[in-house]
Image: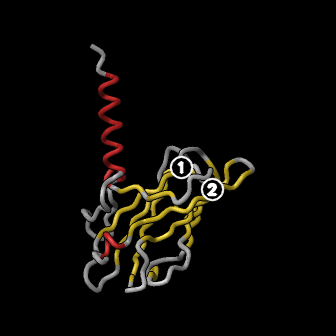
Amino acid sequence: MNTMPRLLSALLGLALVAGCAAPSREAPAGAEVDLAKMASAERRSEKIGVPADVRYAFTGGGAGTPLDLQIAVIPRIDGDDLRIEFPSTPGVSVAKSATAHVFGKASASASYRLSLDLATDAQAPDRLPVIVSMNVGEARYFSVFAIPLRAATGTR
């Protein structure tokens, strides 16, 4: 009996379930979260965009303290000038680092991570926009992803 199709089906099922998971808060602030435990960010458009996936996890943070947001960008193909940007968003301030990060060369065999401290207030939207862009050959592609903030902050 060939078990390969069953194994592939099981792995696909696990990947689908992992992509639907709620934001992870398992690791302490500052500790790197396992990529498999991170939730998938929602791509905001069906148009052709950057050939990459974005995963995220919230760690640490509690009442009155900043949230630690860990982000991983996983290119599906090799490219150049990989950028992750956080547009100015009312009710959200990035406390730890710049609002744009450039990684240069991007390899499909790697994940590119960063960690941010976010402070939110009552004006914060339900979702934090994240812009990911990358050059592939002579073309530049970008996509806007959304990371749910309300689940992390516990507000409605």
Question: 36 or 6: nearer the eye?
Answer: 6
Residue 79, position in %: x, y?
63, 49
Relative to 59, residue 134 above or below: above
- The total of numbered circles placed on residues is 2
- Asked if disc 1 and disc 2 are in contact, CB closer than 8 Å, the reply is yes
Q: For label 1, count other residues whose C-alpha is less than 10 Å away and answer few (under 14), some (14-19) or many (20+).
A: many
Residue 57, position in %: x, y?
35, 63
Q: Residue at 24% across / 62% down in the picture?
A: 26
Question: 122 or 130: nearer the eye?
Answer: 122
The C terminus - image quarter? bottom left
Relative to 16, residue 5 above or below: above
Q: For label 2, count other residues whose C-alpha is less than 10 Å away and answer few (under 14), some (14-19) or many (20+).
A: many
Residue 18, position in %: x, y?
32, 49
* Residue underneath mark 1: 75
Q: What element carries label 2?
A: strand
Marker disc for residue 134 = 2
* Among numbered discs 1 and 2, the one appearing first in the sequence: 1
